[in-house]
Amino acid sequence: DTAVSQTPKYLVTQMGNDKSIKCEQNLGHDTMYWYKQDSKKFLKIMFSYNNKELIINETVPNRFSPKSPDKAHLNLHINSLELGDSAVYFCASSQESLAGHTDTQYFGPGTRLTVL
Amino acid sequence: QQQVKQSPQSLIVQKGGISIINCAYENTAFDYFPWYQQFPGKGPALLIAIRPDVSEKKEGRFTISFNKSAKQFSLHIMDSQPGDSATYFCAASIRVPGNQFYFGTGTSLTVIP
């Protein structure tokens, strides 16, 4: 019944490694996002996909690459991990309301990435 | 540039008191203003939301006050409880296409018994 799920929940890895985080939503939403939350709790948008198309790509290093195989999935691949990548990464999804307005986002439980 | 400004950064309230968190925005194209509540180790969860065509929305102990002319909105938590201790984020969103959300910097609320 989980609306937005992410795996893994915890990820501990060495600097320089490549890792992936997976996200799936079963809400039928057409927009998915990746956010980074640092130690100060600030939520920073990284990417936004609408109907599998990249809509937002904030100033994120190109070591981060999102991949959306279908509308229900948005995975995040990170190459050459650095110490500063340590954070909690949240996946989210949303859907426009029937009236054509924006509607709420639903967040996943987060993936805590620790780079040693 | 921070699209949504939130204050205070932290707030300590006695049990039973009123907690007030304020947010301000610039872009008049925003059409949805949600508040999210986040507990440690969890993802943000929608608490309450408002659209700009109404000035107030109340759900239980939580109320959003919205001032369109001033481009400000606030969250009021009445009869605050220790279980309300969490981080609160205001946000504003716009259709891009898809929906783009801009978050405030968060307020850490502590309700002391």
Image (cartoon, coloured by chain):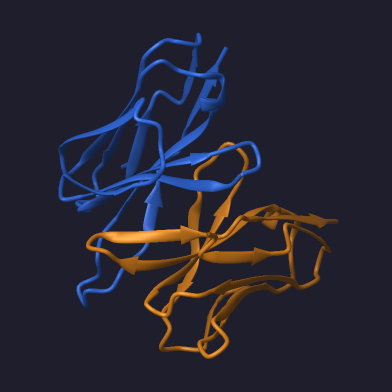
In the rendered view, does A65 fall on the left or right side of A44? left
Question: Which is nearer the eye, A109 or B52?
Answer: B52
Please identify the quarter of the rendering in which residue A63 is found: top left
Please identify the quarter of the rendering in which residue B113 is found: bottom right
Question: Which is nearer the eye, A91 or A43?
Answer: A43
**Residue displayed at 58% across by 79% down:** B72
Q: Chain B rendered in what hue?
A: orange
Question: Which is nearer the eye, A68 or B63?
Answer: A68
Indicate whether B37 appears above or below A1. below
Residue B84 in percent (x, y) is at 68, 57
Q: Which corner quadrant holds the N terminus of chain A? A: top left
| Residue B90 visible within the image | yes
Indicate whether A25 appears above or below B21. above
**Residue displayed at 16% across by 44% down:** A52
**Residue displayed at 34% across by 42% down:** A4
**Residue displayed at 45% across by 17% down:** A81
Residue A61 in percent (x, y) is at 40, 32
Indicate whether A13 appears above or below A57. above
Please identify the quarter of the rendering in which residue A87 is found: top right
| Residue B64 visible within the image | no
Residue A59 in percent (x, y) is at 41, 42
In the rendered view, does A71 fall on the left or right side of B28? left
Residue A102 in percent (x, y) is at 31, 68
Q: Chain A rendered in what hue?
A: blue
Q: Which corner quadrant holds the C terminus of chain A? A: top right
Question: Which is nearer the eye, A26 or B23?
Answer: B23
